[in-house]
Amino acid sequence: MIRIAAILMLAGAFGGGAAAHEPADGGWRLIWSDEFDGPAIDRGKWDFDVDCWGGGNNERQCYTDRRRNAATEGGKLVITARKEKATGPAFPLAQRGEAGKAEAQASREFSSARLVTRGRAAWTYGKIEVRARLPQGQGTWPAIWMLPEDSRYGTWAASGEIDILEAVNLGVRCETCAGGIENRILGTLHFGGQWPDNKHKGDETALPAPLDGFHVFGIVWQKGKIVWTVDGKPYATRVASEWSTSGSTDPAAPFDRPFHLILNLAVGGGLAEDRGLKGVDESGYPKIMEIDWVRVWQCGDDGVSACGSTGDQER
């Protein structure tokens, strides 16, 4: 069940296209979507994180809100990472209230974009799916993920993080990968205490062929259980007995609160640079991540139900 706060944020946000993508069976109700059919990114649905912080992972990009880094093109959202010097706030918005951080600037060697529904839409439970095509190359790090709308249980990662999709270094030579080419995607939860007492659990699976094609990445999230899917097929499951938070005794916490969605393309950073051929291959830029659509379904009136199967909705 969508939380009241989210209902208020979403009032009037649905266009006439919502019903057109309602599944014919399974009981799921489409409650929010973006098909990216308009001439520009819908700022009523999406905000931008603008900073050169590096995501806390030593990433090499500045995130901007410029059209050259994120725009709608041909019915798709296109996030573009470019090899170019960029300058912006040295810290994320949440930290700029701290002494000495509000005016601090930093420069990076790449630019990219990070779109968020924070403050516009957030959900507790449901099916979230994103149809996207991912970039390849050493150091590329596209992600589809979720953060809590508020820090009810404490700062990261006590209030949780849901990584629907991460992929690093796709298409790069990989001795331990099938076919010798990096083709793995990751689905992960972050939880536990506040950093550095955070914990995580995740799974990897091979991205179905074609590696350079569109795929649907998703989760089915109900109270005490989250299932990860790719192209409608489950590949990982986490249950409440596998996670915890220092801020609550409720076994479902911290994944029992509204979370907002994030779409971004990072360059470099710890996860990407520590794997594959190491570091960042600066050739082949710009790199793009294309998103065809984002859809959020919910089921039942209790906020706990998961309708039907985990996948096989209309593509």
Image (tube, grey):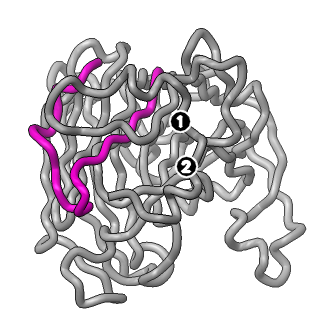
Q: Which mark is residue 27?
A: none
Verify CB contact (< 8 Å) between mark 1 and mark 2: yes
Q: Disc 1 and disc 2: Cα gap in Å?
A: 7 Å
Which residue matches tag 1?
14
Which residue is at 49% across, 25% downward?
291
Q: Position of residue 247 (x, y in %)?
A: 36, 88
Q: Position of residue 110 (x, y in %)?
A: 70, 37
Question: Residue farthest to the right?
Answer: 103
Question: Residue farthest to the top?
Answer: 74
Which residue is at 24% across, 48% downward?
299
Which residue matches tag 2?
10
Q: For the residue marked with disc 1, what is the amino acid?
A: Phe
189 versus 279 height, above or below: below
Q: Nearer the viewer, residue 132 or 13?
A: 13
The C terminus sits in image quarter: top left
**Does 296 appear in magenta?**
yes
Question: Which residues, given as a range, are shown in magenta?
Answer: 292-315
**Does 291 appear in magenta?**
no
Q: Main secondary structure of the magenta part?
A: loop
Q: Is residue 267 visible?
A: no
Secondary structure under tag 2 reads: helix
